[in-house]
Amino acid sequence: MPEKPVVIGVAGGSGSGKTTVTRSICQRFQDKTILVIEQDYYYKDQSHLPFEERLNTNYDHPLAFDNDLLKEHLHDLMNGKTIEKPVYDYKVHTRSTEVIPVEPKEVIILEGILILEDPRLVDLMDIKVFVDTDSDVRIIRRLLRDIKERGRTLDSVIDQYTNNVRPMHLQFVEPTKRYADIIIPEGGQNHVAIDIMATKIEKILSKNRQNN
Ligand SMILES: Nc1ncnc2c1ncn2[C@@H]1O[C@H](COP(=O)(O)OP(=O)(O)O)[C@@H](O)[C@H]1O
Ligand SMILES: Nc1ccn([C@@H]2O[C@H](COP(=O)(O)O)[C@@H](O)[C@H]2O)c(=O)n1
């Protein structure tokens, strides 16, 4: 393990392809090299609230996230400590009681809609990426995914998109693009951008390994 892992932030709107890009990058490396931390797993715990109340939360506002815990976990990982990563359940809108023990790896990818919004996290990143996909494509992807995988109805996805996702994207997510070192149009199918990312990571890793 190098003294300090390479920290990469992958931001972008909901459905832009952040997870797909992150998976494509991970596939280029051995399992032991890259650790992925999803910002979504750090939504504030809402287990004390009744289910009906959890439906009213604005999950696209920066205050929905427990970035204090995320920052603490990132610091621990950077100092070689194992963390207990929370597990999030989109179907019930809160964390599960389960946690996953996670050991540090040479590369840490932080992925989430607002991962470039908190300067305390941005300051710790070596590479900042913004996955940039048109909103019409994103809403179609989100509709399909949320109905299939997150237990949502067509009406609920449309209501949430109109009331929260779109306005918060314009106010908080889109402006973070300016902090990105690399902007990846169209996400996971952009093989050229994935190749460039993988090459850059390889370069930093080989430099770190030489110094250790
Ligand atoms: N290039 C693509 N073409 C078609 N579907 C895609 C593409 N990229 C992602 N998807 C699908 O769109 C949905 C959202 O993608 P995902 O990578 O999870 O985005 P994000 O993490 O930014 O929300 C997923 O169901 C995924 O399989
Ligand atoms: N209980 C929740 C928590 C989050 N969301 C939505 O997830 C989106 C972020 O995840 P992506 O994989 O799409 O980046 C965000 O836009 C939230 O609206 C939710 O619907 N329910």
Image: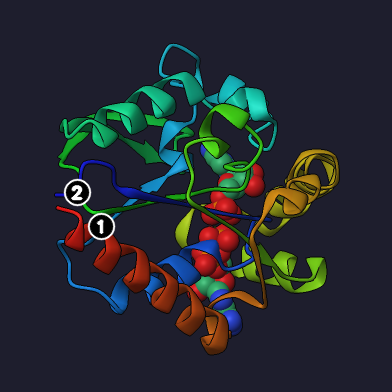
Q: Residue at coordinates 50% horizontally, 25% vertically from top-left?
A: 67
Q: Position of residue 107 (x, y in %)?
A: 30, 55
Q: Position of residue 106 (x, y in %)?
A: 23, 54
Q: Secondary structure at mark 2?
A: loop
Label drawn at residue 9 = none
Quarter of image, res 143: bottom right
Q: Residue at coordinates 55% horizontally, 27% vertically from top-left?
A: 120
Q: In this rendering, would 186 be left or right of 162? A: left
Q: In this rendering, would 9 be left or right of 86? A: right
Q: Earlier in the sequence, mark 1 or mark 2?
A: 2
- Compared to residue 178, the image places residue 59 above or below, namely above
How many C-alpha atoms fall within 10 Å of the one at disc 1: few (<14), some, or many (≥20)?
A: some
* Nearer the observer, 110 or 96: 110
Q: Secondary structure at mark 1?
A: helix
Q: Residue at coordinates 14% horizontally, 49% vertically from top-left?
A: 1
* Nearer the observer, 93 or 6: 6
Kind of residue indicated by mark 1: Asn
Confirm whether residue 33 shows in the render: yes
Q: Are marks 1 and 2 in contact (CB under 8 Å)?
A: yes
* Nearer the observer, 29 or 56: 29
Label drawn at residue 2 = 2
| Ligand 1 closer than 8 Å to label 2 CB | no
* Nearer the observer, 6 or 159: 6
How many C-alpha atoms fall within 10 Å of the one at disc 2: few (<14), some, or many (≥20)?
A: some
Q: Position of residue 198 (x, y in %)?
A: 40, 76
- Compared to residue 17, the image places residue 56 above or below, namely above
Q: In this rendering, would 88 be left or right of 93? A: left
Most extreme residue toward the front is 211
Q: In this rendering, would 38 be left or right of 141? A: left
Q: Position of residue 63 (x, y in %)?
A: 64, 22
Residue identifier under label 1: 208
Kind of residue indicated by mark 2: Pro
